[in-house]
Image (cartoon, rainbow, N blue to C red):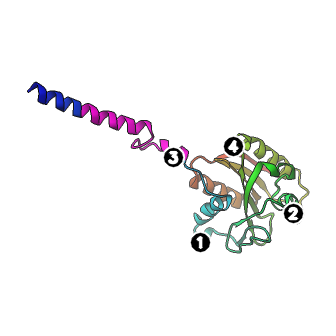
């Protein structure tokens, strides 16, 4: 009887240790502890496509994306980082900071860039995400606007990506809400009117 009880206790201890070990590795906890190891997105384009695909058809605006070599008339498109002047003039990305990113994508209102323009940028060193967000904010706020002014600017971080978008208040606010809903770790760094 003692031998049977010892075997039973040993079996119970073994099972409980196995269960605890799984929880330490982020398995079976239900709290997403293992999710931190997963990348937010494989690319800036994937990030924007995820947000854009969360729009209902009646919420979408006429959109285009990408640069001349990667143009999309259906939504977001890849934006090359080789031409720093084009990144600056189109998306407001500071030319001096191009060395801090290795990927970019864009989404714009097809009728007027000041109605809505968004750039998504992958930062090569996650420790520089805050600095890059600040440089983007300064660069966009100091722009000389043509064809009217956008109403507001929002800058968000999603993992090691920085998103900047400006335009009319309702479109910008909707996009901000869609990013927050699509990516749990999204943080608003800047939400300011453009004067």
Magenta stretch holds residue 54: no
State the image quarter where residue 83 is shown.
bottom right
Whether residue 195 is visible, yes or no, is no
Does the CB distance between marks 2 and 4 fall below 8 Å? Answer: no
**Nearer the observer, disc 3 or disc 1?**
3
Tell me which label, 2 or 1, sits earlier in the chain. Answer: 1
Magenta stretch holds residue 33: yes
Circle 4 residue: 126
Residue at x-position 79% and y-position 57%: 151
Circle 1 residue: 57
Q: CA distance from mark 2 to mark 4?
A: 35 Å
Q: CA distance from mark 3 to mark 1?
A: 30 Å
Part of the protein shown in magenta: 12-37
Q: Is residue 158 left or right of residue 138?
A: left
Tell me which label, 1 or 4, sits earlier in the chain. Answer: 1
Circle 2 residue: 148
Circle 3 residue: 35
Tell me which label, 2 or 4, sits earlier in the chain. Answer: 4
Residue at x-position 73% and y-position 63%: 106
């Amino acid at each position: 009887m003692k031998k049977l009880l010892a075997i039973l206790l040993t079996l119970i201890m073994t099972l409980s240790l196995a269960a605890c070990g799984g929880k330490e590795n982020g398995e079976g906890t239900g709290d997403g502890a293992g999710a931190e190891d997963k990348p937010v997105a494989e690319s800036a384009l994937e990030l924007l496509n995820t947000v854009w695909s969360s729009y209902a058809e009646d919420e979408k605006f006429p959109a285009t994306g990408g640069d001349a070599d990667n143009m999309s008339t259906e939504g977001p498109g890849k934006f090359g980082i080789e031409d720093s002047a084009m990144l600056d003039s189109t998306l407001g990305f500071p030319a001096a900071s191009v060395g801090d990113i290795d990927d970019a994508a864009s989404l714009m209102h097809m009728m007027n860039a000041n109605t809505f323009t968004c750039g998504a940028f992958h930062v090569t060193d996650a420790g520089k995400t805050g600095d890059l967000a600040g440089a983007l904010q300064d660069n966009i706020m100091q722009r000389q606007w043509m064809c009217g002014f956008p109403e507001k600017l929002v800058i968000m971080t999603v993992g090691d990506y920085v998103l900047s978008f400006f335009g009319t208040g309702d479109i910008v606010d909707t996009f901000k809400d869609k990013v927050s809903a699509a990516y749990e770790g999204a943080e608003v760094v800047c939400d300011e009117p453009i004067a």
